[in-house]
Amino acid sequence: MESDELYMQVQRPKYDCLLFDLDDTLYPLSSGLASAVLKNIQDYMIKKLGIEESKITDMGNLLYNNYGTTMAGLRAIGYDFDYDEYHSFVHGRLPYENLKPDPVLRSLLLSLPVRKVIFTNADKVHAIKVLSKLGLEDCFEGIICFETLNPIHKSSISDDEDDIEFLGSTQSSTASNGSPQIFDIIGHFCQPNEGSDGLPKTPVICKPSESAIERALEIAYINPLRTLFFEDSVRNIQSGKRVGLHTVLVGKSQKVKGADYAMESIHYLREAIPELWENDKIREVNYSGVGVAVETSITT
Ligand SMILES: [Mg+2]
């Protein structure tokens, strides 16, 4: 009996789902998309939100570091704008032509008969465009994106009372001149001993928030203990680890705290985690003919 149990344990693949971040994970940072995104976000802050140019770099860094995305931070400190408009401004003019079909990654992915899901903070239009440029649009079961975690779109400040259903509620207030009052995040961090504790909450649900990751796992019926999470962001890796995921830092050859594996490029998947294929070989021998087709659309 004991030996039977051991036998079954050996046969069971360790992972049954691969969860992938998209940007700078499935394609390299050197493609130039990330720097173009940053430039577009800065332009949006200046041109659409009227933020002083001299404050952009500091404010952008503080928002990104404290809220996960600049957008989440802008909403938290009191700016109100349409999410779709923001996404189309930031992602609408990217050098997508720099992304080329990646047949190497495609065949790696297709050779792994486990669930494969995308989990990105970006919007659906961007995610689909990137996957199609890389020639990977049919390699994934579904996409968990901005719209999946933030299904209710807000376009005006008067809707804010409904934000209570989001993670944390914004406490945006209105100045006497009728324009929204903006929380001075640069001033906040200039004060001695001020940390992130006194910051306003954001209505936007995104990585690296642990509850955002847990929500994503729940939506896609993913068991973190049997899932490998691929990410280029160290803080997302660390949050992923805290919710129980097995983690792979992509884009770096050295592991960091919270990362179970590290690989310079997603192309090194087979070399870095050969057990993904070894398990599959064992399974094929023992369970041939038993296939379960899963058709789930996670994209909203
Ligand atoms: Mg990324």
Image: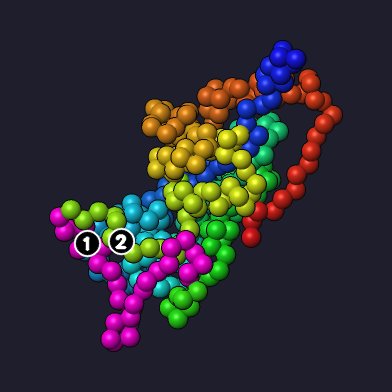
The residue tagged with tag 1: helix, strand or loop? Answer: helix
Q: Could you tell me if the residues under marks 1 and 2 are in contact, i.e. CB atoms within 8 Å?
A: yes
- The residue at the far front in this view is 1
Residue 18 is at least partly visible in this image: no
Q: Quadrant of residue 72?
A: bottom left
| Residue at 40% across, 43% down | 235
- The residue at the far right in this view is 289
Quadrant placement of the C terminus? bottom right
**Range of magenta residues:** 163-192
The residue tagged with tag 2: helix, strand or loop? Answer: loop
| Amino acid type of the residue tagged 1 in the rendering | His
Residue 69 is at least partly visible in this image: yes
Q: How is the image coloured?
A: rainbow
Q: Is residue 178 magenta?
A: yes
Numbered label tally: 2
N-term mark: 1 or 2 = 1
Q: Give x and y (percent) for residue 258.
A: 42, 34
Q: Give x and y (percent) for residue 40.
A: 39, 61
The answer to whether residue 14 is left or right of residue 54 is: right
Q: Is residue 186 magenta?
A: yes
Q: Which sits in the foreground, 164 or 123?
A: 164
Magenta stretch secondary structure, dominant:
loop
Q: Disc number at residue 188? A: 1
Quadrant placement of the N terminus? top right
Q: Which sits in the foreground, 80 or 52?
A: 80
What distance separates the C-alpha of mark 1 from that of mark 2? 8 Å
Rate crowding at label 1 as few (under 14), some (14 to 19) or many (20 or more) other CA atoms within 10 Å.
some
| Amino acid type of the residue tagged 2 in the rendering | Leu
Q: Disc number at residue 27? A: none
Q: Disc number at residue 199? A: 2
In the image, residue 241 above or below residue 286: below
| Residue at 52% across, 24% down | 272
